[in-house]
């Protein structure tokens, strides 16, 4: 389910229930993700990397909000969100409690953010 | 039972590395033990293991030992997902694959067969290439198993990604 969360976020932020799985063992982890059209790439919590026993498949340099550059290992995972499935998606990990769904995923869908009504519509046209 | 022990050891190892990374200076065994919440004897054992894995350095101070995170690792260990010894082993392997890639990158750039393609490196050599990243990774894992690899799209320019949304913890 994709919705606005006005409890944890002020102002309210669009979030989604997602499932991330290891593309080979299919071990899965469910959790929340923030819809982040400002992120070039999707990010998963570091603890999920451990739980799913993901192995690195590269590195990416990432600039954070203040311009700090960090090199982070990259992993390939399968992502399920709101009935949409994406296989072998390259993601990064970070010390977060939720995931970020970036434009690598969002640009494959039609996402309408109605901030005024706090509603989101996600379609695969 | 072994899984539980392994998991507990990983947690202590992670906490120890995290503490030493934050300290970034020489620390007595007893101080690390207190911070992590285990006995000095147990901590000595963990620190010796980390020393054997090349993750920490030891200095003698009379009968006592002092420890610090290995300087060359401190930047990478700042990233929490680096803090497991098991993750670190896999990451080191991926770094080694990248080193191998960088050695041949100029040659690949000059080869029209690889132009704009994703390449996969394993055991120090290019094992596959494809313009479809997903198909490439699927094929490499299918053929070589789920092991650390290095995958990158071959291009001259350095690519910096933006992920500006932090998560504030109060």
Image: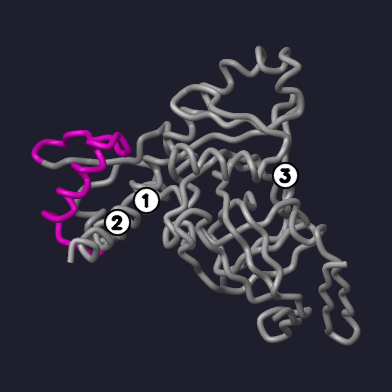
Give SS at disc 1.
loop
Q: Position of residue B6 (x, y in %)?
A: 24, 58
The answer to whether B132 is drawn above or below residue B113 in the figure is below
| Residue lying furthest left | B63
The answer to whether A46 is drawn above or below residue A90 in the figure is below
Chain-order first, disc 3 or disc 1? 1
Q: Position of residue A53 (x, y in %)?
A: 42, 55
In terms of image quadrants, where is residue A77?
bottom right
Q: Does the magenta-highlighted stretch encompass residue A46?
A: no
State the extent of the magenta-drawn residues as a range: B37-63
Point out the image quarter for the C terminus of chain A: bottom right
Point out the image quarter for the N terminus of chain A: bottom right
Residue at the image point whose x is 79% and y is 61% from the top: A106
Chain-order first, disc 2 or disc 1? 2
The numbered mark at residue B163 is: none
**Do pointers 2 and 3 mark residues of a single chain?**
yes
Give SS at disc 3.
strand
What separation in Å lies between label 2 and label 1 (alpha carbons)?
6 Å
Q: Does the magenta-highlighted stretch encompass residue B48?
A: yes
Q: Are marks 2 and 1 in contact (CB under 8 Å)?
A: yes
What separation in Å lies between label 2 and label 3 (alpha carbons)?
31 Å
The answer to whether A12 is drawn above or below residue A51 in the figure is below
The numbered mark at residue B161 is: 3
A15 left or right of B104 in image: right
Identify the chain of the residue marked 2, using the numbered disc in the image.
B
Residue at the image point whose x is 62% and y is 65% from the top: A99
Q: Which residue is mark 1?
A: B84
Q: Are marks 2 and 3 in contact (CB under 8 Å)?
A: no
């Amino acid at each position: 389910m994709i919705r606005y969360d006005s409890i944890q976020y002020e102002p309210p932020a669009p979030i989604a229930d997602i499932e991330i799985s290891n593309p080979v063992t299919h071990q899965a982890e469910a959790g929340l993700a923030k819809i982040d059209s400002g992120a070039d790439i999707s990010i998963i919590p570091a603890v999920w990397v451990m739980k799913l026993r993901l192995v690195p498949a590269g590195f990416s340099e990432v600039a954070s909000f203040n311009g700090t550059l960090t090199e982070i290992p990259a992993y390939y995972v399968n992502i399920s969100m709101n009935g949409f499935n994406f296989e072998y998606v390259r993601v990064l990990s970070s010390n977060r409690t939720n995931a970020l769904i970036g434009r690598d995923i969002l640009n494959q869908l039609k996402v309408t953010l109605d901030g005024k009504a706090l509603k989101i519509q996600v379609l695969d046209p | 039972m072994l899984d539980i022990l392994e998991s507990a050891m990983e947690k202590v190892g992670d906490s120890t590395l995290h503490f030493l990374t934050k300290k970034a200076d020489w620390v007595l065994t007893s101080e690390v033990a207190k911070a992590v919440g285990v006995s000095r004897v147990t901590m000595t054992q963990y620190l010796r293991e980390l020393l054997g894995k090349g993750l920490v350095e030891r200095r003698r101070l009379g009968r006592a030992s002092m420890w610090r995170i290995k300087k060359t690792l401190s930047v990478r260990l700042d990233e929490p997902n680096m803090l497991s010894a098991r993750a670190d082993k896999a990451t080191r392997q991926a770094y080694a694959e990248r080193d191998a890639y960088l050695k041949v990158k100029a040659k690949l750039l000059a080869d029209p067969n690889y132009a704009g393609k994703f390449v996969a490196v394993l055991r120090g050599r290019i094992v596959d290439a494809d313009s479809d990243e997903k198909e490439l990774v699927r094929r490499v894992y299918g053929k070589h198993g789920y092991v650390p690899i290095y995958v990158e799209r071959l291009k001259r320019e350095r690519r910096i990604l933006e992920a500006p949304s932090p998560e504030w913890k109060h």
